[in-house]
């Protein structure tokens, strides 16, 4: 069976496109109980961008803190319950932030129309009813969450996305100016999520010409941004990074992630390590899977003098490592791609444990 991929309905791209949000939302405001919900990264509270959010009377604006934990099922359930209880069914949800905030917005747009906890819907095509209109406005680029068909949430049992056609944004607003304030390390870690998506997509079973076309372009952009003559955090490079993130996401959507994300999910679920950072920690030690790309990655780390701690595993108990191994082992779709459909015959929990011990 081939994937029947649902793309974003509309995309606006370019410096200052944030200013078009009000016009884009205007025709949608008549729907349901006629108010908009803005889910905004808490970083922007009290900053200039907060004053530019086109909230009308009756709209709800939530500044969500995503620094303690990656988005959780509990966080989404609470927001959903509050919105429905206070004001009813919104006309639409707008997520302004990185992958974390965009995933909250995507999940909320589904959960306002679906009963019970979002935990019930972690997986593929488990959501029963279509969600409402939703818009994604990335403020840090690389995850591809702006175009993917999943809203990744951490629940009590698993870190897994709510994945279905209705998850995909109706509208993406890609304004590279919003990336200007991102801390240099974070700009690197999240950008590397894009680079790693492309490398993982091309290093496995599900790779194909669709994935390659987008992945090649995204990798070429990453190489200009992180290794080119004008490498660095500039507006010109952020214009490229916005598109690299989108194309990396599209490349991935038509292929699959592999070993790096499987290890990274273990680090995030058990230690609460942030996604882009966890990917970098893992990718640095996965030469048997990604070969020269790991050398290229190390050059990028050196070029940008990024903090990448080593020897972390010395501090981890056997119990902690085993818990991470378990999370990682239970991602069969990633190992299928990375190793092959017979991966269980070639790859054991012990092999995964050896990788964690290298970190
Ligand atoms: P993030 O959303 O977790 O944010 C990282 C940090 O950057 C936070 O401290 C945030 O406050 C800050 N930040 C964001 N924008 C800023 C700005 N303009 N200026 C200053 N600071 C800013 O980062 P991310 O790497 O984009 O997202 C990671 C999350 O995305 C994880 O939860 C991961 O699971 C998820 N993810 C989802 C998908 C998907 O397809 N849905 C894909 C990859 C990752
Ligand atoms: Zn990723």
Image: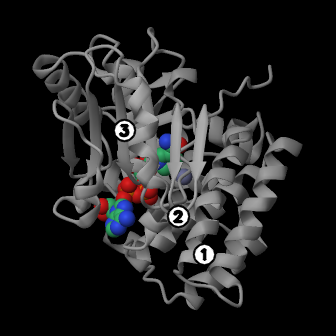
Q: Nearer the viewer, residue 2 or 357?
A: 2
Q: Nearer the viewer, mark 1 or mark 2?
A: 2
Q: Is residue 140 above or below residue 144?
A: below
Which residue was labeled with disc 2? 15
> Does 295 sit left or right of 171 as displayed?
right
Q: Residue at x 66, y 88 (%)?
A: 230
Residue 244: x %, y % from top left? 66, 60
Label 1: which secondary element = helix
Residue 348: x %, y % from top left? 61, 45
Q: Is residue 357 visible?
A: no
Q: Nearer the viewer, residue 48 or 89?
A: 48
Which residue was labeled with disc 1? 237
Q: Is mark 3 within 8 Å of ligand 1?
A: no
Residue 350: x %, y % from top left? 56, 52
Placement of the N terminus among the 4 image quadrants: top right
Q: Is residue 140 above or below residue 168?
A: below
Determine the CA span between mark 3 and mark 1: 25 Å
- The quadrant in which residue 211 appears is top right
Q: Is residue 221 above or below residue 210?
A: below
**Between discs 3 and 1, the one toward the N terminus:** 3
Label 2: which secondary element = loop
Q: Nearer the viewer, residue 76 or 256?
A: 76
Determine the CA span between mark 2 and mark 3: 19 Å
Q: Residue at x 17, y 22 (%)?
A: 81
Ligand 1 positioned in quadrant: bottom left
């Amino acid at each position: 069976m081939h994937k029947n991929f649902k793309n974003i309905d509309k995309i606006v791209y370019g410096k200052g496109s944030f200013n078009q949000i009000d016009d884009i939302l205007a025709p949608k405001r008549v729907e349901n109980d006629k108010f908009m919900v803005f889910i905004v990264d808490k970083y922007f509270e009290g900053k200039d961008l907060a004053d530019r959010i086109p909230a009308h009377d009756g709209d709800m604006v939530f500044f969500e803190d995503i620094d303690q934990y990656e988005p959780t099922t509990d966080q989404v359930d609470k927001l959903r319950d509050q919105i429905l209880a206070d004001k009813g069914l919104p006309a639409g949800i707008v997520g302004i932030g990185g992958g974390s905030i965009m995933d909250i917005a995507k999940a909320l747009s589904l959960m306002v129309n679906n009963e019970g906890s979002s935990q019930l819907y972690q997986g593929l095509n488990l959501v029963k009813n279509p969600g409402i209109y939703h818009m994604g406005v990335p403020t840090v680029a690389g995850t591809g969450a702006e175009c993917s068909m999943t809203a990744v949430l951490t629940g009590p049992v698993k870190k897994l996305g709510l994945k279905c056609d209705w998850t995909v944004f109706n509208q993406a607003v890609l304004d590279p100016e919003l990336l200007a304030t991102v801390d240099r390390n974070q700009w690197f870690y999240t950008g590397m999520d894009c680079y790693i998506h492309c490398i993982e997509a091309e290093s496995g079973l599900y790779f194909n010409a669709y994935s390659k076309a987008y992945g090649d372009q995204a990798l070429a952009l990453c190489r200009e941004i992180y290794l080119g003559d004008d490498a660095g955090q500039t507006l010109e490079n952020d214009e490229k990074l916005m598109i690299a993130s989108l194309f990396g996401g599209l490349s991935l959507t038509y292929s699959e992630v592999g070993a790096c994300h499987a290890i990274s999910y273990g680090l995030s679920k058990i230690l609460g390590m942030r996604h882009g950072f966890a990917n970098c920690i893992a990718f640095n030690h996965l030469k048997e899977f990604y070969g020269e790309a790991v050398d290229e990655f190390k050059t990028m780390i050196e070029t940008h003098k990024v903090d990448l701690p080593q020897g972390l595993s010395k501090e981890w108990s056997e119990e902690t490592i085993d818990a991470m191994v378990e999370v990682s082992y239970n991602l069969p779709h990633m190992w299928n791609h990375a190793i092959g459909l017979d991966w269980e015959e070639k790859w054991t929990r012990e092999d995964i444990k050896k990788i964690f011990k290298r970190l």
